[in-house]
Image (cartoon, rainbow, N blue to C red):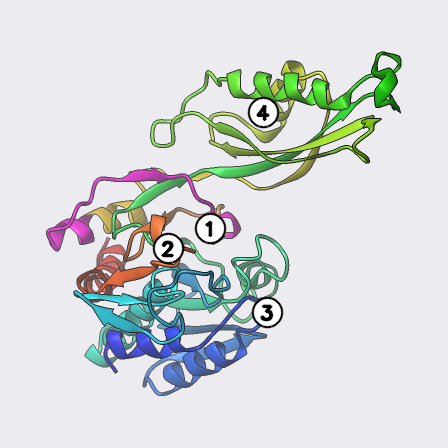
Amino acid sequence: MSVLSLHADLVRIPSLSFQEKPAADHVEAFLRGVDGLEVGRLDENVWASLGDGTDDVLLLCSHLDVVPPSEGHPYPPFSPTTVDGAVYGRGAVDAKASGAAMLTALADLAASGWRPPAGGRLVVALTECEETGAENNGMEKMRDRVFGDALPEPTAALVGEPTELRPCLAQKGLLILNVTAQGETAHAARAHLGKNALTVAARDLLAIDAMTFEKSDPLLGTPTITATMIEGGTAKNVVPDRCRITLDIRSTPATTHPELTALVREALESRVEVHSERIIPCSTDPDSRVAQAAVAAVSSLGLDAEPFGSPTASDWIFVADVPTVKIGPGRSELSHTPDEHVEIAQLEAAVDVYSEIARSYFAT
């Protein structure tokens, strides 16, 4: 089966988070039809191995779930449509392009007779619930319940997300803070008897906009901080005693989440509490074998191999203890948009990129 056919099959399946079973069934059937693979499954997480080594394990992983369609899709979101050399549809780029290319690369390698050297193993895994952020995450399940049991622990990984096939060697983390401005209730006709929490929050919002961070990462730059939600007030004639703000901070390895939290607390009047800090920033040594293999493979195909840092999070956080490269076909900014699509040339090139990375990695 060609990568285009497999990609189209996957896009046709509306695999929203928690609804991935039909997609997982399709992937499992595809893999069981390839000679030489050892196939496994846990819930809606499917994997296959080529080779039986346990000392040197290269994991290629991506996710099956997609976000719901939104208004404004130019074509039916679950009917893959080819226009001007690109395939449109929900999940076309995030991340069924990566998944289809990884599966095809594995099948092609197996059919060619290639195998990892003694002690080596190539694994491809497609998982559930990446888009949920935390709940029921498939790669987290694999880390906790599959690696070290049904599969050996990976020693390096590729995470399939749209990067236009450029090697991504760092990605920002996500720290979410809850800010609560405290005031004192009064009748709006006697506002001077109270303390307006909205006014406190307004001062804090200005302070947030003025915040800068000194420590910079070579690939990711400095952290960013953005107020994304605000809630306050109970009635139009009551001085509000509370206002809540949600902060989205995209972190880098140069500054820890506790350090960032402390800096925000120092800058604001309001109470600051951590809502979530589990999505840590990640980075990989450019001299690691997998990074070198990725750069060499992309370069050999005449594509842009300059490593970069990504502002978006991914399942990398669940393999952060091994050298990892995020790489896949398509443009990240099209993810989750009505205009989501992937260029056919990128999709086809991705099969060669993943195959060449595997060959290069195990040749060193």
Q: Is residue 299 magenta?
A: yes
Give the x, y percent position of residue 142.
Answer: 55, 63
Q: Is residue 118 visible?
A: no
The reply to whether dot 2 and dot 1 touch (C-beta < 8 Å) is: yes
Query: Looking at the picture, does residue 355 appear above or below residue 310?
Result: below
How far, Cα to Cα, is label 3 from label 2?
20 Å
The reply to whether dot 4 and dot 3 touch (C-beta < 8 Å) is: no
Task: Determine whether the residue tagged by mark 4 lies in a helix, strand or loop.
Answer: helix
First in sequence, mark 1 or 4: give its number.
4
Q: Is residue 4 visible?
A: yes
Circle 1 packing at 10 Å, graded few (<14), some (14-19), many (20+), is: many
How far, Cα to Cα, is label 3 from label 1?
17 Å
Please give the label number shown on residue 260: 4
Q: In this figure, which residue is indicated by the disc labeled 1?
A: 314
Task: Determine whether the residue tagged by mark 1 lies in a helix, strand or loop.
Answer: loop
Give the x, y percent position of residue 281.
Answer: 49, 38
The reply to whether dot 2 and dot 4 touch (C-beta < 8 Å) is: no
First in sequence, mark 3 or 1: give its number.
3
Quarter assignment of residue 274 = top right
Q: Is residue 41 magenta?
A: no
In front: 52, or 352?
352
Q: In this figure, which residue is indicated by the disc labeled 3?
A: 18
Please state the extent of the stretch shown in magenta in the rendering: 296-318
How far, Cα to Cα, is label 2 from label 1?
8 Å
First in sequence, mark 3 or 2: give its number.
3
Give the x, y percent position of residue 302.
Answer: 10, 51
Circle 2 packing at 10 Å, graded few (<14), some (14-19), many (20+), is: many
Give the x, y percent position of residue 156.
Answer: 39, 53
The kind of residue on which mark 4 rests is Leu
Q: In this figure, which residue is indicated by the disc labeled 2?
A: 161
